[in-house]
């Protein structure tokens, strides 16, 4: 895994820096013709898990970016709880990923674009752990544009 520390780019605020890393993951998904959503998990200023959508490649509806990152971070830490960690994800988590975040007991979720159709905050804000801090809208335009452009290109091909 390519480890990146926040100290490597001190000119950015931490949330913007790590959202840029999540955007790199989203672009990896885009290169695979997957919905371009990316995620990273950070603990003590260091990325310990990365993920991007792999639902088509793995033929698995649960292979969302967040789920991939949760698995990688838990493996790195050697345990299933992600307390003292932050999830950065380019699109607001769906109900499934928000529910999984509850079980990880992750401390913070920082997301880029809001998902007006499938985002969990539109459905039920109690899906995350009560101690989890939520922050939305970090680099929202850039994150949202990736997804919009992806679906626009899909529609123009049909």
Image (cartoon, rainbow, N blue to C red):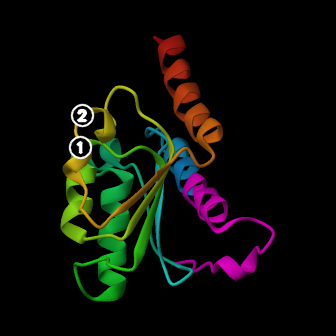
Judge by depth and name the residue closer to the eye, 4 or 29: 4
Residue occupying image coordinates x 51% and y 84%: 44
Q: Nearer the viewer, mark 1 or mark 2?
A: 2
- Identify the image quadrant of the C terminus: top left
Q: Nearer the viewer, residue 45 or 132?
A: 132
**Residue 62, can we see it?**
no
Provide the residue designation for mark 2: 123
Question: Does the magenta run of residues contain 131?
Answer: no
Spatial CA span between label 1 and label 2: 8 Å
Write down the region rendered in magenta.
1-24
Quarter of image, res 116: top left
Residue name at image x 46 percent, y 36 percent:
114
Pick the front one: 7 or 147: 7
Query: Farthest bottom residue?
Result: 78
Residue marked by disc 1: 95
Residue 46 on image: x %, y %: 55, 81
Would you say the residues marked 1 and 2 are in contact, meaning their CB atoms lie under 8 Å apart?
A: yes
Is 19 inside the magenta-drawn segment?
yes
Tell me which label, 1 or 2, sits earlier in the chain.
1
Residue 97 is situated, as x and y percent measured from the top left of the image, at 27, 52
Q: Above or below — where is 46 with respect to 27?
A: below
* Rendered view: 105 above or below 147: below
Residue 98, image x and y in percent? 27, 52
* Res. 46 mark: none
Q: Is residue 86 visible?
A: yes
Q: Nearer the viewer, residue 32 or 94?
A: 94
Q: Secondary structure at mark 2?
A: helix
Element class at badge 1: helix
- Please identify the quarter of the rendering in which residue 83 is found: bottom left
Tell whether 142 sits left or right of 87: right
């Amino acid at each position: 895994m390519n480890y990146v520390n926040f100290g490597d780019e001190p000119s950015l605020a931490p949330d913007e820096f790590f959202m840029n890393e999540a955007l790199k993951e989203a672009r990896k998904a885009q290169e695979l013709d997957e919905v371009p959503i990316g995620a990273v998990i950070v603990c003590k200023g260091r990325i310990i898990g990365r993920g991007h959508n792999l639902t088509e490649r793995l033929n698995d509806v649960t292979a969302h970016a967040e789920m991939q990152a949760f698995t990688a971070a838990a493996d790195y830490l050697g345990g299933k709880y992600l307390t003292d960690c932050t999830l950065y994800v380019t699109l607001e988590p769906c109900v499934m990923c928000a529910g999984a975040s509850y079980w990880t007991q992750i401390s913070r979720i920082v997301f880029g674009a809001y998902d007006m159709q499938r985002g969990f905050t539109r459905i039920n804000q109690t899906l995350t752990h009560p101690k989890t801090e939520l922050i939305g809208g970090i680099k929202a335009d850039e994150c949202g544009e990736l997804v919009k452009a992806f679906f626009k290109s899909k529609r123009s091909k049909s």
